[in-house]
Image (cartoon, rainbow, N blue to C red):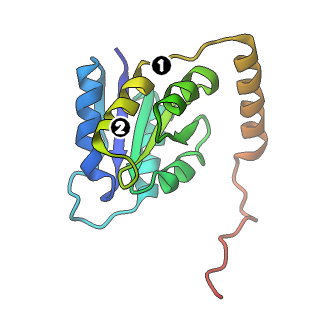
Amino acid sequence: MTLIAIAADHAGFPLKALAVQELEHLGHEVLDLGAFDASQPDDYPDFAELLANAIINGEAARGVLICGSGVGASIAANKFPGIRAAICHDTYSAHQGVEHDNMNVLCLGSRVVGTELAAEIVRVWAQAVFSNEERHVRRLNKVLAIERRNLRDKSSVSAPSTQR
């Protein structure tokens, strides 16, 4: 089967073991990138970077990234070229994201979905395959063109102000 990377911050930690179990049950090999201790303070961008680099460098074909809401993990992962990450809190989005959009990173919010639904989402995502239908390939190529034009070092872009 496929080598799938998985990573979670402290908030996503409780759901990570369940996702690993589901992936292994389906016959996938899992590359666990942490966190390994939920009691230690950590930040989701660090785990998004580890997971994205594992995919970019060919160490894993796809990945599952978990934080409290799934939002931060998704935002951080999508900053990397070649990563198509999406939050999926339902099974339709999980399989459709792969079949139509060639999504390669599933993001979950451990504070949003329960364990049974999370297990089902991981299962349908892991079993989904990109359709290669002409319309989906055409759309994906447009997304990749946008990425090539815009995902580069934009040193003139600054962080939003935290002052009120």
Residue at 52% over, 29% down: 92
Residue at 28% over, 42% down: 115
Quarter of the N terminus within the rendering: top left
Depth check: give the residue in front, 107 or 58.
107
- Image disc number at residue 117: 2
Q: In the structure shown, which secondary structural element does the residue marked by tag 2 occupy? A: helix
Residue at 56% over, 52% down: 75
Q: In the structure shown, which secondary structural element does the residue marked by tag 1 occupy? A: loop
Depth check: give the residue in front, 94 or 52.
94
Measuring from the top left, give residue 71's x and y in whole percent: 51, 54
Measuring from the top left, give residue 48's x and y in whole percent: 45, 49
Quarter of the C terminus within the rendering: bottom right
Kind of residue sitting beneath label 1: Ala
- Image disc number at residue 139: none
- Counting labels gives 2
CA neighbours of label 2 inside 10 A, class few (<14), some (14 to 19), many (20+):
few
Measuring from the top left, give residue 3's x and y in whole percent: 35, 24
- How far apart marks 1 and 2 lie (CA) works out to 16 Å
Eye-nearest disc, 1 or 2: 2
- From the viewer's perspective, is residue 16 above or below residue 145? below
Kind of residue sitting beneath label 2: Leu
Q: Which residue is mark 1?
A: 128
Residue at 54% over, 41% down: 86
- From the viewer's perspective, is residue 100 above or below residue 105? above
Image-based side of 75 in relation to 135, left or right: left
Image-based side of 133 in relation to 66, left or right: right
Q: Quadrant of residue 40?
A: bottom left
Mark found first going from the N terminus, 1 or 2: 2
Q: Quadrant of residue 20?
A: top left
- From the viewer's perspective, is residue 105 above or below residue 134? below
Depth check: give the residue in front, 53 or 135.
135
- Contact between marks 1 and 2 (CB within 8 A): the answer is no
